[in-house]
Image (cartoon, helix red, strand yellow):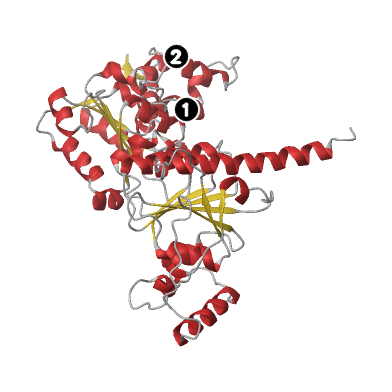
Amino acid sequence: MSLIRYNRILLSHLTLSKQTRLITPKHPSSIIIRHATEIRSRKIVRNDGNTKQRKNTVNPIAQIKKLAKILSNENLEAIYNRFDPLREDPSKDPAFLDQIATIKNPLQNIIQLKDNDIRFSNRIIKAKNRQERYKKGYVLLEGKRLIADAIQAGADLLTIFTTDQQILDTIDFSPTDLNFTAYQVSPSAFRTWSDVQTSQGVMAIFAMPRPDTCSFQQRITLPITVICDNVRDPGNMGTIIRTCAAVGCDRLLALKGCVDIWDPKVIRSGMGAHFRLPIINDVGWETITNHIPEMSKIYLADHKYSFEENKTLSDNNPSKQMFEEMLEKRKQIKRSDKTEDRSYSLSNNRFLPLYKNIPIDYQSLWQAFSNIKSSDHSTIIVGGETEGTSLQARKLTIEHAGKMVYIPLLNDVESLNVGIALSVILIELRKSYEDLVQKSYLIEHKDV
């Protein structure tokens, strides 16, 4: 048979074979392995003028193992156990061949990059730039621990860069679908784009989770929502995210004006908690009520009542009377979902500054959480390091009949770091919910 004719037969076999329908398009390598094995077993030879089919002398399993480059012998044995061990030739089973062929290990096909290769620099630049980061959906992580935590949390790994292949041996990639690309770069090129002084020689780009979603399946939640208002320090934002994930908050809302939650400095400070908590970034005050339950209890966290009442308006002032009437009407209005409340806007809003002079009931965190119920949803608002909470935060608290919560401090200490203060408040709030659950459990099993 001539080479041209054999190629035509091979091409027609690849295009017309019915068994190609059993191959998933996500794994084209399985098609190559399948047809390479089938055509080899049907190869036509001539012997004494008679045409017959030659028996395959190549071990198909060994050939598949060689071409597919499977992850480990343990994975291969696991696939063997899924099929009947008494079967004569399991390699003839199309499903068996698909399973073997699709288990590929990208870590065995690491691509070597030169110092001037733009595949490394372009991806890192896009992941570090805020606009490009959201456009491409990239999240950049550096360090073995951060990458390992993200993988264990179920994050989608896209690309990984390393200076040494042995570094990747210390990371467990078994939770991934092995659908990523691995590159090896020189140490000098890696140091150019590294953000840490002592580099560990490994970076990874993950897919950015969708807003208000969490890839961590074993998550335990409490009815608590945290709102960050003007938190601009990356270290404090990372601490807040990590604390919310550790306490079990339902979600975190980062308002406009806060630092980007996917900034590399925030991610390092969060220590992998970004993938264990639903987060909504860049939320506007106009839509804030769409992200919290209607009957949620609002708690405005602040150091011991910094508000000093200034009676700038007299009781007979028409503006004050108009404002009080407007406030009562707003408390009675039933909100509708997916709408913008323009009363939170700063532009041309003559009523918003008046909320500064309205007193708010303030209590210590032990008093504020003493009467909480297990069915109550709580919303905690924390302000930034320099500006504190905004007028919109006061407006939301007043219109929802909320409270201002403070931590009693000793020795003339004025305030705490926003991350530390929120940690104390959330732990106390979590304790209140757990005490309610424990009391209800004791009541139910009292007579048992």
Instruction: Provide the residue designation for mark 1.
Output: 99
- Disc tally is 2
Residue positioned 51% across, 66% down in the render: 359
- Viewer-proximal residue among 16 and 132: 132
Residue positioned 50% across, 59% down in the render: 291
> Crowding near pointer 1: few (<14 within 10 Å), some, many (20+)?
some
Name which of mark 2 and mark 1 comes first in the sequence: 2
Which quarter of the image is occupied by the C terminus? Answer: top right
Left or right of residue 300: residue 143: left
Q: Estimate the x, y position of residue 44 in percent, counting from the top left.
A: 34, 22
Name the quadrant containing residue 83: top right
Instruction: Report the amino acid beneath label 1.
Output: Gln
Residue positioned 45% across, 66% down in the render: 287
Instruction: Report the amino acid beneath label 2.
Output: Asn
- Viewer-proximal residue among 412 and 293: 412
> Crowding near pointer 2: few (<14 within 10 Å), some, many (20+)?
few
The image shows residue 239, relative to residue 80, as above or below, that is: below
Contact check, label 2 and label 1, Cβ < 8 Å = no
Q: Estimate the x, y position of residue 94 in percent, counting from the top left.
A: 49, 29
- Viewer-proximal residue among 13 and 132: 132
Left or right of residue 48: residue 318: right
Instruction: Provide the residue designation for mark 2.
Output: 73
Which mark is in front, 2 or 1? 2
The CA distance from mark 2 to mark 1 is 14 Å
Residue extending farthest front: 411
Which quarter of the image is occupied by the N terminus? Answer: top left
Determine whether the residue tagged by mark 2 lies in a helix, strand or loop. Answer: helix
Determine whether the residue tagged by mark 1 lies in a helix, strand or loop. Answer: helix
